[in-house]
Amino acid sequence: MSHPVLTVAESLKDRARAALGSRNLILVGLMGAGKSSVGRIVAHQLGIPFVDSDAEIEKVSRMSIGELFAAYGEEEFRALETRVMKRLLKNGPRVVSTGGGAFINDRTRKHIKKGGVSIWLKADLDVLWERVSKRDTRPLLKTENPKQTLENLMNARYPIYELADLTVLSRDVRKELMADEILQAVIDARTESAAR
């Protein structure tokens, strides 16, 4: 007599990996939202590569982001960022963290929308400020009142970040919990689109 084989329900990471397929998972949001730190965890959980677009830009230019801004200005930096993002998103799957302004640029946003699933890591001002005020490596915050500058960036950019495919709230919780919430958002989105 044979016994029925019982299967264990797929794990969260397995279901998210299946839902993602060959698409890239692109994290967007303001500086300090957790795109890089949480993105690395998500990539590890999914068993796919992680790429930080700012690190790639620094690698190809052989300059830091701050040096690029100082030497060439924001407009030239954004043009380079667009070229790098286009190249990064040609292959997948991978988790890609973007710079805070990448999704704001129309051309870069089109590449992101075409290149995979975009997830906005949305955080409130206090959470962002707590994270970014620890280091002075953010070129856009080298102002007389950096917290006000950050708030101004929120006001200008949040309506554009809302165009991302999915939104996950970035808050003061363990990074692993946020990573799990990203995985669940990918699963839920795939389930909803399959139900249509």
Image (cartoon, grey):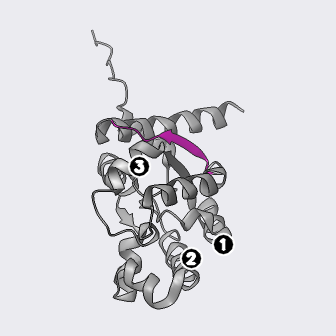
Who is closer to the viewer here, 131 or 26?
131
Q: Compute the Cα span from label 2 to label 1.
A: 7 Å
Name the residue rendered at 53%, 53% in the picture.
Answer: 151
Name the residue rendered at 55%, 58% in the picture.
Answer: 153
Q: Which mark is residue 128?
A: 3
Quadrant assignment for the C terminus? top right
| Quarter of the view holding residue 94 | bottom left
**Residue segment shown in magenta:** 164-172
Q: Compute the Cα span from label 1 to label 3.
A: 26 Å
- Which amino acid is tagged 1? Arg
Q: Position of residue 104 (x, y in %)?
A: 61, 64
Work out whether 32 lies above or below 183. below
Q: Earlier in the sequence, mark 2 or mark 1?
A: 2
Q: Position of residue 7 (x, y in %)?
A: 33, 23
Work out whether 66 lies above or below 38. below
Q: Which mark is residue 82?
A: 2
Q: Position of residue 182 (x, y in %)?
A: 44, 41
Residue ID for mark 1: 107
- Which amino acid is tagged 2? Thr
**Residue 127 vs residue 152: left or right?**
left
